[in-house]
């Protein structure tokens, strides 16, 4: 695959530059990078990678000192997959798209009168 192709709002492209984490101590050269804009586009990217025999890794901001996001296969950038999908007040859970930055999540939760828990609940 060469250049950029667009499916819906997301895109896939041949990775021409190496990926680096924020600290610069980890680099990798993915075959392609994909920025899906929907769950369907994400599923298509994973199916295509499987058909091509490639491993898939996803990366957020790359804020890790480990090589957890490094890949020579397909690198998924979920930045277009953002927002709250569901709030279950009874279960005290919120389902969030994988590319939602924490600062945006905190703002969205505050609008709902909610916030992130900073520690696990203790047994009573």
Image (spheres, rainbow, N blue to C red):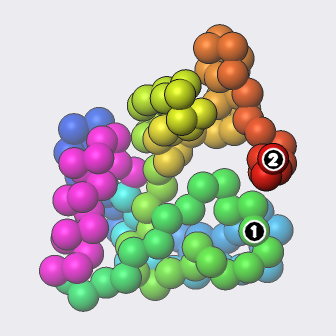
Where on the picture, by quarter, is residue 18?
bottom right
Residue 94 visible in rendering: no
Q: Residue at x 64, y 39 (%)?
A: 101
> What residue is shown with label 1?
64
37 within the magenta span: yes
Neighbours of disc 2 within 10 Å: few (<14), some (14-19), many (20+): few
Give above or below for 32 relative to 99.
below
Give above or below for 3 relative to 8.
below
**Disc 2 to disc 1: CB gap under 8 Å:** no
Neighbours of disc 1 within 10 Å: few (<14), some (14-19), many (20+): some
**Residue furthest to the bottom:** 53
Q: Residue at x 26, y 75 (%)?
A: 49
Give the alpha-carbon distance from disc 2 to disc 1, as whole Å: 35 Å
15 within the magenta span: no
Give above or below for 118 relative to 56.
above
Give above or below for 100 relative to 123.
above
Q: Residue at x 16, y 80 (%)?
A: 51
Q: Which residues are magenta?
A: 35-51
In front: 112, or 58? Answer: 112
> What residue is shown with label 2?
124
- Residue 113, x across and y down, in percent: 69, 14
């Amino acid at each position: 695959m060469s250049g950029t192709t667009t499916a819906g709002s997301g895109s896939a492209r041949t990775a021409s530059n190496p990926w680096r984490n924020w600290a610069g101590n980890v680099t990798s050269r993915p075959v392609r990078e994909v920025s899906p804009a929907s769950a369907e586009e994400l599923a298509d990217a994973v199916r295509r990678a499987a058909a091509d025999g490639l491993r898939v890794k996803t990366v957020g901001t790359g804020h890790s000192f480990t090589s957890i996001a490094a890949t020579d296969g397909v690198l998924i950038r979920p930045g277009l997959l953002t927002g709250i999908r569901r709030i279950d007040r009874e279960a005290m859970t919120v389902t969030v798209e994988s590319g939602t930055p924490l600062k945006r999540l905190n703002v969205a939760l505050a609008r709902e009168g909610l916030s992130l828990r900073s520690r696990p609940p203790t047994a009573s």
